[in-house]
Amino acid sequence: MRSLNTYREYGSGRRWLLRCAIAGLAGVCFAVSASALDPTRAVSQYLHDSWGTPRGWPGGSITAIAQTSDGYLWIGTDKGLVRFDGLNFRQFERAHPEPILIGPVRTLLVDARDNLWILLQNTLVFRYQNGNFELIRGETENGTTAMVRGTSGEVLLSSVAVGTLTYSDNRFRSLSSAASLTDAARVANSEAPDQRATPFSWFDRLAAPTSLVISMAQTDDGKIWLGTERRGLFYL
């Protein structure tokens, strides 16, 4: 297997190959939209390519994709984490240096410092930098159900235990607590909240305290939107 250092020695060529691969994928997307304008043209008339088992794809349903500045394409699947350099796939079965199993991936993102963040289905969070996987401990060590890159490049996370968090400048900062989520849910369900102010605004009868946040997004006005598993949408 190629190490990260080996890759950098041939980085220029690898990046060129990967750009070609991405161009091929873009061609597929273009073909779909263009065919609506010109239904007489066949898909074979457009640039496209594919990678399956015969070309080294290790298999699995793809759940997330992200690209780091060194050109690597990172792919999360229901079987784990895969890295693609434009020619070859490498599956990471365990973290390094701590040999923790890397299971099904929920979310991938790249932060402002070009670190790759990996959220697993089991709610563990890793940060990949300088060839090592760092298990994020403390506030997000267990119970993280959603993660997204904010508009300024910071990492936003939702935790069952501590609510919504942001990570920037090497530290976590709480944006909401589990207690305020409980209060907001009581307001949404026409119940009396505790004597604490809540930063949440609700649409319809939204998240109950037990409704997991499974999707996040931040808009240009600074609002953080949280999509829940069963009770709808809210923002803070």
Image (spheres, grey):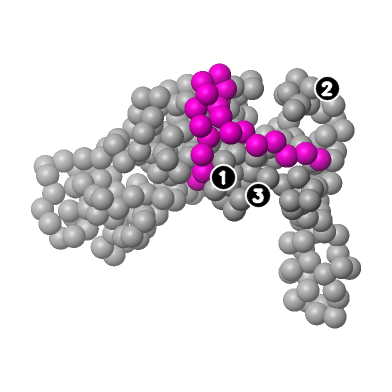
Quadrant (top left/top right/bottom left/bottom right) for the N terminus: top right
Q: Which mark, residue 236?
A: none
Image quadrant in which you'd find residue 70: top right
First of labels 2, 1 by sequence position: 2
Q: Identify whether 176 is placed above or below 205.
A: above
Residue type, label 3: Gly
- Taking depth in this image into account, of 92 and 197 the one nearest to the observer is 92
Secondary element at tag 3: loop
Residue type, label 1: Lys
Secondary element at tag 1: loop
First of labels 3, 1 by sequence position: 3
Q: Identify whether 220 is placed above or below 41.
A: above
Horizontal arrangement in the rendering, residue 6 relative to residue 153 (left or right): right
Q: Which residues are magenta?
A: 87-106
Residue drawn at the location 51% of the way across and 43% of the way down: 104
Q: Which mark, residue 79?
A: 1
Residue 185: where, in percent of width, then height? Answer: 22, 53
Alpha carbon of mark 2 to alpha carbon of mark 3: how far?
A: 28 Å
Provide the residue designation for mark 2.
Answer: 9
Which secondary structure is most common in the magenta stretch? loop
Closer mark to the observer between disc 2 and disc 1: 1
Q: Identify whether 103 is placed above or below 189.
A: above
Q: Count residues near mark 3 (Cα–Cα under 10 Å), then give few for <14, some for 14-19, many for 20+.
A: some
Residue 191 on the magenta span? no
**Answer yes or no: do the residues labelled 2 and 3 have beta carbons within 8 Å?**
no
